[in-house]
Image: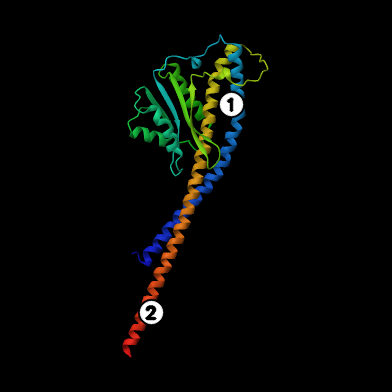
Amino acid sequence: MPNAQDIRRRIKSVKNIEQITKAMKMVAAARLRRAQEKAAASLPYTQKVREVLASVASHASDLSHPLLEVREVKNIAYLVLSADKGLAGAYSSNVIKEVLPRIAGRKNSSVIAVGRKARDYFKRRGYRIDEEFTGFSEKPTLQHAINIARSVGEGFKSGRYDEIHLVYTVFHSAITQKATSVKLLPIEDVAGADANPSDYIFEPSAEEVLSHLVPQYLETTIYGALLQASASELGARMTAMGSATDNAEELIAKLILNYNKIRQATITREISEIVGGAEALK
């Protein structure tokens, strides 16, 4: 049975942990608000780019682009967006679980890892990792999205990949985030998008517009997914650190109760010894 000194040390240790988790929760909450604003601000632009791309595809069906090419699927790559750091609950593991059934036992599948958690998980288990991007999962920028888009675009155009799927987490709230997978390349379903019925006049030509619009659509799609993943990570971390803080408070209360019981038992025993000694002197 632990003595009072051991319990005092444990209380001090748990209080230190509580301070850390409370600080991490506050930092995540502050960053989450900004991440939500960025994610919300990027949606209208992504939707408008998709709308214009759909209009080009529907009015100029004879045009082609390397990123629109549909071919026999031999090699598939999964662009997986995970966290760089832990202490975010099941955030990264949920993304990994979304990918695992798709690549398990398939030799023609590979991973493009964004975030250290996905990279480390798949590397330890012997999966093929073609590229990795780390160090910005909480604070992604457009340049990060451009770098990733260039890499996956070159891989698709060169024939290294016949399909590329994007696996990330959609942010609903600080408590609810859902891992999802979408086909990133080839871009197939833009013609079926709900485009604005207004006709566009393309200058200098629809072909020239398409050549610039398709890579831009790829970049904005990846950037939007990075922002969603960032908000999801921060929301998951805020929730996890809030639960950890609550658990620490409960544990401290139990330890204080045990400490008081031991003190009371020690005082009672000492009083009994004193009383017993006094009785023996009579």
Q: Is residue 84 left or right of residue 195?
A: left
Q: In the rendered image, which quarter is residue 264 located in?
A: bottom left
Sequence-first disc among 2 and 1 = 1
| Element marked by disc 1 | helix
* 275 vs 45, nearest the viewer: 275
* 120 vs 177, nearest the viewer: 177
What scheme was used to colour the molecule?
Answer: rainbow
Q: Which mark is residue 86?
A: none
Q: In the rendered image, which quarter is residue 57 located in?
A: top right
| Element marked by disc 2 | helix
**What residue appears at the point 60 percent right and 37 percent down from the top-left corner?**
37
Percent position of residue 11, x then y: 42, 61
Q: Amino acid at mark 1?
A: Thr
Dots 2 and 1: beta carbons under 8 Å? no
**What residue appears at the point 39 percent right and 75 percent down from the top-left corner?**
267
Q: Amino acid at mark 2?
A: Ile
- Residue extending farthest to the bottom is 282
Res 280 visible = yes
As measured in the structure, the alpha-carbon distance from the residue carrying label 2 to the one carrying label 1 is 77 Å
- Residue extending farthest to the right is 198
Residue 104, compared with residue 59, is above or below; it is below
Instruction: Return the residue at label 2.
Output: 271
- Residue extending farthest to the front is 101
| Camera-nearest label, 2 or 1 | 2
Q: Quadrant of the C terminus?
A: bottom left
* 56 vs 261, nearest the viewer: 261
Q: Quadrant of the N terminus?
A: bottom left
Residue 121, compared with residue 199, is above or below; it is below
Instruction: Return the residue at label 1.
Output: 46
Q: Is residue 198 left or right of residue 13?
A: right
